[in-house]
Image (cartoon, helix red, strand yellow):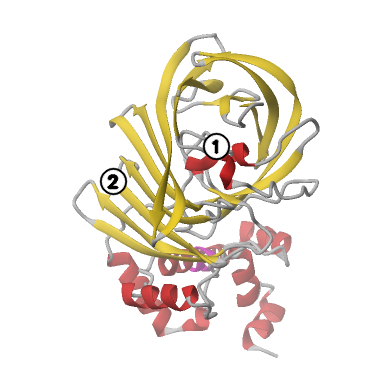
Amino acid sequence: MRLSALRSVSTGHPTDRALDRYVDREPTERARVAEHLVRCAACRAAVAFRRNLRDAVCRLPQPEPSPDLLMRVLTDRASGQRLILPNAWPEARRARAWPLAAGLAAAAAVVLATWLPQRERPHAAVPSDWFVSGSLFVDAAGAQAPAPEPPLSPAGPADGARLRPRTLQYVARWTDTTGHERFDGRAVVALDSVRMDGAPVWRVAQTWRGETGDHGEHVEAETLWVARADLRPLARGVHVAPYNRAFGRLEVTQRFVGDSVLGAMHAEGTDGHEVRRPIARRLPDDGAPYLTDAFAPLFLSAVDVGPRWARRVTIAGWAVVPNDVVYPVALRVVGAERVTTPAGTFDCWRLLVTARGRVLDYWVRKGDGVGVRSRDAAPRAGRDGTRGVREVVLTGE
């Protein structure tokens, strides 16, 4: 029997392993340990030490693969070779607290973490609201989205020959529960036929300009290249400025190779420091078709949509962190309506778009599948804390 177990039997204190499990929020013996902590200051101090140790270790700088290594991986995979890539899908690896027996190495890590300057690090949070600002059909990122229930067939097959070069203009409005309406942003989505690595591809460029209280104008720009025939994503570049209070500018570059997305993130801090992170994530085998933010208003132009149509798509996130790789989205046609926007009056299919517990109403033109309007299905909190609904409408093309 271990010494810690003997001590538990003789003193009534939880074992070291039981305290580790309590800090890790494992259900085993959790209620018994919690009851003991109420009356035992020594064990409370041991739990506090474990938590501080875990948090300090998790804040230590993570070693990153060199750009040369990522380039070799990209080249090898493009030639058909299979290499193991870092992968945390479908759930993020959970950092565990180290036992006290970790000894001097852990203690040294705590000392280093205490003295290292802590900065707010950019992550791949997906901004709210789909198809012109941030991710298409998903709200702000926080956890990997579950698959739509009940399971739906993938949307498609997509026929890229149905697309044509065009430019779409949208405006977003926020209406609070008192009926007060305000301008919330403007977007331009441009589709062009270009060549990439000698092959014909579609290029989608989306630029979103809105207002952010502390920073003035907020700009999000994305350029996406997709295969001409089946609209598979090939590469993407994202620019956000400002990103948040700590980072005035963020850039994400991605290349989709086989079953993986590779690339890098670069963020410039407002105090002059920079953060760089490589991207190397596996995409689920059953996730296709994959879309990104810029392509949302156009994708349904390439598939057959009709009465009682119900399908799924998967949104590819920035993939900088494990819980922002993919977002399954369910699409269902619930009726036909005639919709008037500043760009005109159109016969449309009305869809319900469901992702991560949120539902949006979305209208696409029957003639060409272009998105002309979206609206929150229920009131929610806005950036200033007031509740309301956000609507995006087509204003020109």
Residue range in magenta is 46-50
Residue 173 in the image: above or below residue 245:
above
* Nearer the observer, 34 or 9: 34
Taking 201 as reference, is 305 left or right? right
Q: Residue at x 54, y 48 (%)?
A: 142
Q: Position of residue 221 (x, y in %)?
A: 37, 41
Q: Which residue type carries mark 1?
A: Leu
Q: Is residue 138 visible?
A: no
Q: Position of residue 387 (x, y in %)?
A: 55, 21
Q: Position of residue 86 (x, y in %)?
A: 50, 72
**Mark closer to the observer (1, 2):** 1
Number of numbered discs on residues:
2
Q: Main secondary structure of the magenta part?
A: helix
Residue 249: mark in rendering: 2
Q: Per the image, is 206 magenta? A: no
Residue 41 in the image: above or below residue 242:
below
Q: Per the image, is 49 magenta? A: yes
Q: Residue at x 45, y 79 (%)?
A: 76
Q: Residue at x 67, y 15 (%)?
A: 338
Residue 332 in the image: above or below residue 153:
above
Q: Quick one: SS at disc 1?
A: helix
Looking at the rendered image, the quarter that the C terminus falls into is: top left
Q: Residue at x 30, y 40 (%)?
A: 241
Q: Position of residue 101 (x, y in %)?
A: 51, 83
Please name the residue that numbered disc 1 is placed on.
Answer: 298
